[in-house]
Every structure is written in C-alpha cells, then in structure tokens.
C-alpha cells in the first residue's frame, strides 16, 4: 500500500516539474510591443469631374457679344526670343571654264602617237619595195599589206599599178628615193584636193548648223563635245542641242562637255522628240546670236529603217530654220569594212558632207581613210587620236602620211 502511495506522489512531482518547464519557456518568448495608436492618414480625393450640364460658376447677367465684336489677343514679341532668318541655300559653284588647246597644227603634235600604231603599214611597204628583185610574189605581198590595212580593193590595185610603173622607170632605188616615192603615192591616194574645213558659217544671219550622226558606240556624243572645244578654241560661240533622247545620260554627258568651255546645252525630257529638241536648239542659237549650233543625234543601227527615217525627220525639221551646213558621220576606225556599210546607208538618208574617224590611234588599219572617202566621195575632216579632251584634230593628209611611213 505504501508502495502505491509513493508511486503516485512521484508521478505528481514529475508532472508538476514538466508543467513548470513549459510555462517557463513561454515566459521567455517576448511578445511584440504594442505600438501606440497613430493618427489616421489624411486622404485627398481628386477634384470631382464636372458633370455634363454643370457650370463652373453662377451665371452672371451680362450683355452677350457676337463673334465679330470679340477682339483677338495680340501676341507681343518677346524681347528675349531670337529672330531666326533662314538663309537661302548656297548655289553650286559655276564650273571653271577651260581654255581648249589651239587646233592649228594639232595633228602634227599628235603625229608621234599616231605613228606608233600606224607605221606598220608604211614600214611593211618600204621593206617590200626595198627588195632587190620585185617579182610577182613581192607585189602580191604589197597588195596583201594594203588590203589588211583596209585601204580597199580598188584603191589598192590603183596604188600597186602606179608603184610598179614608177619603180620600173626609176631603176636603182635608194631608201630615200623609195620613201619619197611611197609618200607621194600615198598622198595621191589619200587626196590633197579635198576641202576638209568644217563648214560653220551659213552665209546668212543664222548660225552655222552642224548635225552629228552615226551608229551606237562610235563615240558620237564625245565627238560632239570635243568638236565644241575645237570651235571654241578657234574663237566661235557654240550652242549644243542634245537630240539624243534614247540613251540614258547622253544629255548630261553633252552638257558636261559644254559647261567646260562655256557652251549652253538645249535639252528635253528623256525619250522626248529628237526633232523638237533640234528645232529648239537652232531657235535658241538664233536668239542668242551664236556662231554655231551643234546637234548630237541618237546613235542608231544602220539596219533599223524606222530609226533612219527619224534621222531624216530631224534634218527636215531643222531646215525649217536654216539649211544644214554640215552633216558629219562618225565612224569607228577599228570597224574596218563594216564601217563602209554603215556609211553607205547613212549617206542614203542624209547628205553626208564630212567624216569623223574615231579611235584612229588604236588601229594599224589607217587605210580606212582612203576607203571611206572613195565610198562616199566626201572627205575625212576630223580624226580622233586619243581619249583626251583635245585629241580631236582636223585631218591633215601630209601629217597622216608621214605618220604612216614613219621617220
């Protein structure tokens, strides 16, 4: 019995001890301090939006004015506001006017350049003629040399016959005698009795009118620009007509050439009527009192009938102002016999009065000068001897033949 009572007492003590520990641990945990109550925050509400029909203020009894009676406020200029003045855009600087090289003796000065590519013909002929025995084979070689240089069949046969006769009469031949003989015969073949002056004086009160024609790719527009330089160098005033409206930038190209020497260019819209532009150019030239009007026409294939007919139309329209003084046909010297076909067709459409041979410095086929003159019966008046602005020269037969046979 005592044992049971003791066990109960022990159990009570144990339970009491456990309970004390739990209470003690709870007392150790600090509760957060209670904050003092603060004042309630002030909330500012946005102003109430006026409702439709609300008025901002109590209406007052005033006399109402019409809109005409209301004076608008006048803005007073601010003393501190700067006055901005817009300056007009600066005009582009005028192109510098160039002074072209004088044309007198220009081809003589360019002879060295010409002879570098041309004297193969002259040297070949001199070598063959210097043989001790001129048999039939040698004369055939001379014929082949001339034909290769695009002299043409008929002129070649004529030259060979004259050379054979003169060599037979001459007998013994020294190099100097052969050179003099060949020079004389080539000059006869090229022709010294042609009038090679570019006609730029009409004899009337109108400017001289020059029309430049040719196929695509012969350097026609460039030749027209260089011809303007030739005329300006000789003291003539020039107006350019950009009647090539089919090739992109042709008018720009011609205008650039003109601006270099102070010549004005008359142009129209791309794809416009060439005859109309040519007509306007002559009209402007008359109004300005210009000495010469140069008309650059569109390059056209000689096989295209419609384009060739249009070229005839340009000529007829221009002649309503005044007759044409020159129709210059531009030919590429490197095209050889094909150039003769082109020349023949152009001559049927317009009356060709002179020939301009371009790229003559880049070919050993200088005989085209002889062939094209024989084909058309008109002289070569100008030759292009390079890419420079002043490399277009009046054709001089003596200088040309001297370049052919070399020094």
Image (cartoon, rainbow, N blue to C red):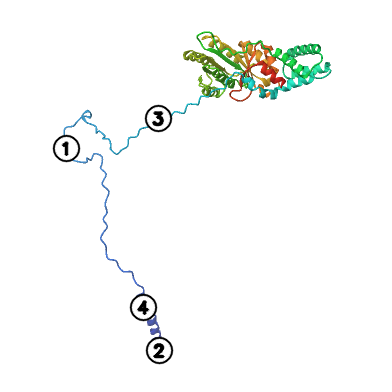
Residue indicated by mark 2 = 6
Judging depth in this view, the residue of 252 and 286 nearest the camera is 286
Taking depth in this image into account, of 300 and 321 the one nearest to the observer is 321
Mark 4 or mark 2, earlier in chain: 2
Q: Residues within 10 Å of mark 1 (few under 14, many from 20)?
A: few
Mark 1–mark 3 Cα distance, whole angstroms, equals 55 Å
In the image, 40 versus 342, the foreground residue is: 342
- Real-space Cα distance between discs 4 and 2? 27 Å
Numbered disc in front, either 3 or 2: 3
Q: Earlier in the sequence, mark 1 or mark 2?
A: 2
Element marked by disc 4: helix
Task: State the image coordinates of residue 124 (x, y, percent, origin top left).
Answer: 76, 21
Of the 4 image quadrants, the one containing the N terminus is bottom left
Q: Which residue is mark 1?
A: 60
- Quadrant in which the C terminus is drawn: top right
**Image-quadrant location for residue 374:** top right
Q: Which mark is residue 24?
A: 4
Residue 117 placed where, x, y %?
Answer: 70, 24
Circle 1 SS class: loop
- Name the secondary structure under disc 2: helix
State which mark lies toward you, 1 or 2: 1
State whether residue 1 appears in this view: no
Query: Could you give the CA–CA distance between mark 3 and mark 2, rounded to whole angstroms?
Result: 122 Å
Real-space Cα separation, disc 1 to disc 2, in angstroms? 105 Å
Residue 190 is at least partly visible in this image:
yes
CB within 8 Å, label 4 to label 1 = no
Q: Are marks 1 and 3 in contact (CB under 8 Å)?
A: no
Query: Which residue, given by chain and number where applicable, does mark 3 sit on?
Result: 88
């Amino acid at each position: 019995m005592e044992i049971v009572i003791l066990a109960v007492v022990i159990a009570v003590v144990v339970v009491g001890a456990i309970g004390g520990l739990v209470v003690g641990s709870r007392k150790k945990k600090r509760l957060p301090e209670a904050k003092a109550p603060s004042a309630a925050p002030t909330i500012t509400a946005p102003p109430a939006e006026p409702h439709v029909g609300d008025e901002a203020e109590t209406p007052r009894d005033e006399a109402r004015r019409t809109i005409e009676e209301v004076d608008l406020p006048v803005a007073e200029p601010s003393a501190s506001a700067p006055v901005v003045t817009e300056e007009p855009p600066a005009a582009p600087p005028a192109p510098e006017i160039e002074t072209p090289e004088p044309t007198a003796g220009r081809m003589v000065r360019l002879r060295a350049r010409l002879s570098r590519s041309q004297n193969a013909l002259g040297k070949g002929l001199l070598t063959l003629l210097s043989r001790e025995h001129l048999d039939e084979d040698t004369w055939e070689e001379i014929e082949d040399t001339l034909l290769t240089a695009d002299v043409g069949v008929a002129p070649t046969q004529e030259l060979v016959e004259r050379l054979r006769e003169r060599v037979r009469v001459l007998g013994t031949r020294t190099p100097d005698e052969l050179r003099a003989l060949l020079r004389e015969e080539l000059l006869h073949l090229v022709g010294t009795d042609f009038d090679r002056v570019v006609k730029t004086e009409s004899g009337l009160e109108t400017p001289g009118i020059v029309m430049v024609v040719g196929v695509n790719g012969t350097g026609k527009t460039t030749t027209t620009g260089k011809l303007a330089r030739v005329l300006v160098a000789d003291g003539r005033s020039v107006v350019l007509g950009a009647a090539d409206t089919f090739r992109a930038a042709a008018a720009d190209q011609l205008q650039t050439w003109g601006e270099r020497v102070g010549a004005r260019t008359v142009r129209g819209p791309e794809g416009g009527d060439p005859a109309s532009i040519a007509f306007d150019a002559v009209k402007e030239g008359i109004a300005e009192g210009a000495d010469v009007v140069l008309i650059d026409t569109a390059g056209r294939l000689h096989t295209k009938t419609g384009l060739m007919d249009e070229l005839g139309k340009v000529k007829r329209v221009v002649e309503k102002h005044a007759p044409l003084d020159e129709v210059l046909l531009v030919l590429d010297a490197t095209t050889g016999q094909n150039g003769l076909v082109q020349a023949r067709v152009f001559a049927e459409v317009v009356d060709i009065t002179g020939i301009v041979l371009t790229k003559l410095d880049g070919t050993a086929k200088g005989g085209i000068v002889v062939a094209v003159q024989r084909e058309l019966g008109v002289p070569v008046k100008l030759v292009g001897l390079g890419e420079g602005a002043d490399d277009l020269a009046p054709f001089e037969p003596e200088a040309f033949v001297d370049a052919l046979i070399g020094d």
